[in-house]
Image (cartoon, rainbow, N blue to C red):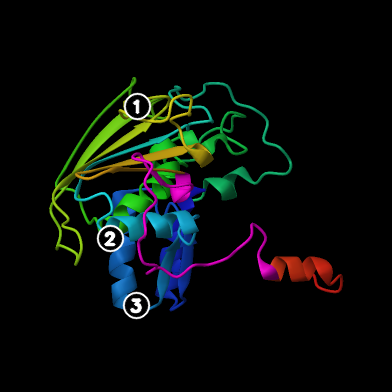
Amino acid sequence: ADHTHAIITADAMTMGKHVYCQKPLTHSVYESRLLTKLAASTGVVTQMGNQGASGEGTDLVCEWIWNGEIGEVTKVECATDRPIWPQGLNAPEKVDRIPNTLNWDLFTGPAKLNPYNNVYHPWNWRGWWDYGTGALGDMACHILHQPFRALKLGYPTKVEGSSTLLLSACAPQAQHVKMIFPARDNMPKVALPEVEVHWYDGGMMPERPKGFPEGKQLMGPGGGLTIFHGTKDTLICGCYGEQPFLLSGRVPNAPKVCRRVTCSHEMDWVRACKEDKSNRI
């Protein structure tokens, strides 16, 4: 679970081991800063994995923006259909029997040892602050990845948010977060001015853009939506950058500058092991 990523990664780096960690990298901003310093001081090779990062949709989004197809981007709106797990709840008072298939102490790891309750596990830990990072931590890694990569974003200068009732134990049911990022160095074909990025979850959504295809669902494929508002056009895609299109209906003719990676849901070595019955994972 999210709350164990940092301590496992830090332990590996201090042992001199290279690390690949799937998103979300950490459970808190403090942990992210700690791992950044550790990676620099230990000199190991590290990478955060992000599903969809090598997909064609992400590449196309970058290529279209870098080619100036939609002009300068000053506003981006992102949304997810999550949470699809419990959020906005108080900590349970009931104590349930721990399943014999679960080592609750081991799962808890560095977190506070709460009495076990069925609402925490399996899978539903994502909405509880002791273990998960809520809808934003779970899905923004995927949906904000395209804006961060295409617009070469760094750290925001201002962040403000609003949400449903804030509780100490659980993420809110819905929230809207606004982030302001400063101007970056211009690219050869497009400038990168200050940009405001909006995040919505829990059923909250941006306004339907004027000219959006009638009858088409605003929420994109994969349960995600990103809208790049440019000075020339508007670029829209789903989670992982899937199925990008321009609101004008124009087909971009941008040069291919990203490396295309053809992959399936099942990695080659997994498939090989299944085919070779003598192999055991």
Please name the residue shown 30% across and 28% down the image: 210
Identify the residue position indicated by label 2 in the image: 66
Q: Residues within 10 Å of mark 2 (few under 14, many from 20)?
A: many
Question: Which quadrant of the structure image shows residue 120?
Answer: top right
Q: Is residue 21 above or below residue 236?
A: below
User: Dot 1: within a 10 Å radius of its alpha carbon, few (fewer than 14), some, or many (20 or more) residues?
Assistant: few
Quadrant in which residue 16 is drawn: bottom left
Q: Position of residue 42 (x, y in %)?
A: 34, 77
Residue picked out by circle 1? 208
Which quarter shows the C terminus? bottom right
Residue type at tag 2: Trp
Residue 2, labelled with which disc?
A: none
Q: Earlier in the sequence, mark 2 or mark 3?
A: 3
* Between discs 1 and 2, the one toward the N terminus: 2
In the depicted structure, whether residue 167 falls above or below residue 104: above
Is residue 214 or residue 89 the one in the foreground?
214
State yes or no: residue 264 in magenta: yes
* Residue 143 position within the rendered picture, expressed as x and y whole percent measured from the top left: 40, 45
The percent position of residue 96, horizontal first and vertical second, equals 64, 27
| Disc number for residue 42 | 3
Whether residue 229 is visible = yes
Q: Which residues are magenta?
A: 239-268
- Give how far apart the Cα atoms at labels 1 and 2 are: 25 Å
User: Taken as a whole, is the magenta stretch helix, strand or loop?
Assistant: loop
Mark yes or no: residue 6 visible: no
* Residue at far right of view: 277
Q: Secondary structure at mark 3?
A: helix
